[in-house]
């Protein structure tokens, strides 16, 4: 305890302040991790990442107490941390946002600004839960990215365009290119199925066309998640 008292006095923090700041950082990190789990319950979660959010919040709080009001210590800390290299690939942009969420919570707890720390984390958490509950930003159903390869002929695209008119409510050409040394032409369309038409019916109809080699149908949501 003497060590804690000496350290706290050197940084203008009492021992109680240090303990309370770290406890609050832990609680806020726990809240951030809990919200992350709730809003990502349909995905495979990494226990390592969930625990990292909690640890990060406490570590940042400790860093803020070490830095205090000293600019020299801040620059020294940046120099020391610059030797660390992080090679983990973040697959989802939401994960990056939660990392910053945990950082901000730890910073607010570390400087002892309890009202901002508690109110800020609570407000952001409620907003995130509300957005998840309302499924804000989710892709509309029935919209797909259609890709297929067909042998080029002297005729126009009437063969598959006729199927488009029968089964699709809308279709927009995205790209056309030759593949396999010009043996096939690959078409890419953003399409929307008509009501009552399922994706397998569209795939079967296109696959039955003469010269059709490969048909791929991806939902807009799965494309954005990739």
Image (cartoon, helix red, strand yellow):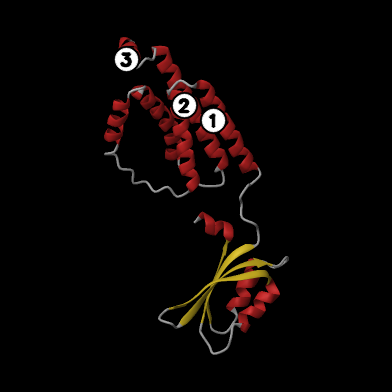
| Residue sitting farthest toward the front | 71
Of residue 160 and residue 83, the one placed in the foreground of this image is 83
Q: Position of residue 210 (x, y in %)?
A: 57, 84
| Mark closest to the chain's N terminus, 3 or 2 | 3
Name the residue rendered at 36%, 22% in the picture.
69
| Mark closest to the chain's N terminus, 3 or 1 | 3
| Mark closest to the chain's N terminus, 1 or 2 | 2
Q: Is residue 45 visible?
A: no
Q: Is residue 13 left or right of residue 27?
A: left
Q: Is residue 24 above or below residue 97?
A: above
Q: Which residue is mark 1?
A: 121
Q: Which mark is residue 31?
A: none
User: Please, what secondary structure does the residue beneath circle 3 have?
Assistant: helix
Q: Position of residue 60 (x, y in %)?
A: 40, 29
User: Please, what secondary structure does the residue beneath circle 1 have?
Assistant: helix
Q: CA distance from mark 1 to mark 2?
A: 10 Å
Q: Which mark is residue 10?
A: 3
Name the residue rendered at 45%, 17% in the picture.
20
Q: 10 Å neighbourhood of mark 1: few (<14), some, or many (≥20)? A: many
Residue 121 found in image quarter: top right
User: Please, what secondary structure does the residue beneath circle 2 have?
Assistant: helix
Are the residues tagged 3 and 2 within 8 Å (C-beta)?
Answer: no
Q: Which residue is mark 2?
A: 108
Q: CA distance from mark 3 to mark 1?
A: 29 Å
Name the residue rendered at 61%, 50% in the picture.
137
């Amino acid at each position: 305890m003497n060590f804690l008292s000496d350290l706290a006095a050197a940084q203008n923090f009492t021992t109680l302040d240090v303990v309370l700041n770290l406890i609050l950082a832990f609680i806020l990190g726990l809240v951030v991790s809990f919200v992350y789990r709730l809003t990502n319950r349909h995905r495979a979660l990494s226990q390592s990442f969930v625990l990292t959010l909690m640890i990060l919040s406490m570590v940042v709080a400790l860093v803020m107490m070490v830095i205090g009001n000293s600019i020299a210590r801040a620059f020294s800390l940046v120099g020391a941390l610059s030797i660390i290299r992080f090679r983990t690939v973040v697959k989802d942009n939401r994960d990056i946002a939660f990392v910053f969420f945990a950082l901000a919570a730890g910073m607010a707890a570390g400087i002892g600004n309890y009202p901002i720390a508690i109110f800020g984390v609570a407000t952001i958490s409620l907003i995130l839960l509300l957005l998840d509950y309302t499924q804000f930003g989710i892709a509309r159903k029935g919209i797909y990215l259609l890709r297929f390869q067909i042998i080029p002929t002297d005729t126009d695209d009437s063969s598959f365009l006729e199927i488009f008119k029968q089964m699709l409510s809308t279709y927009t050409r995205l790209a056309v290119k030759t593949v396999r040394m010009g043996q096939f032409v690959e078409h890419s369309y953003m399409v929307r199925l008509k009501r009552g038409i399922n994706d397998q019916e569209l795939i079967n109809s296109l696959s039955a066309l003469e010269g059709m080699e490969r048909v791929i149908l991806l939902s807009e949501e799965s494309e954005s998640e990739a």
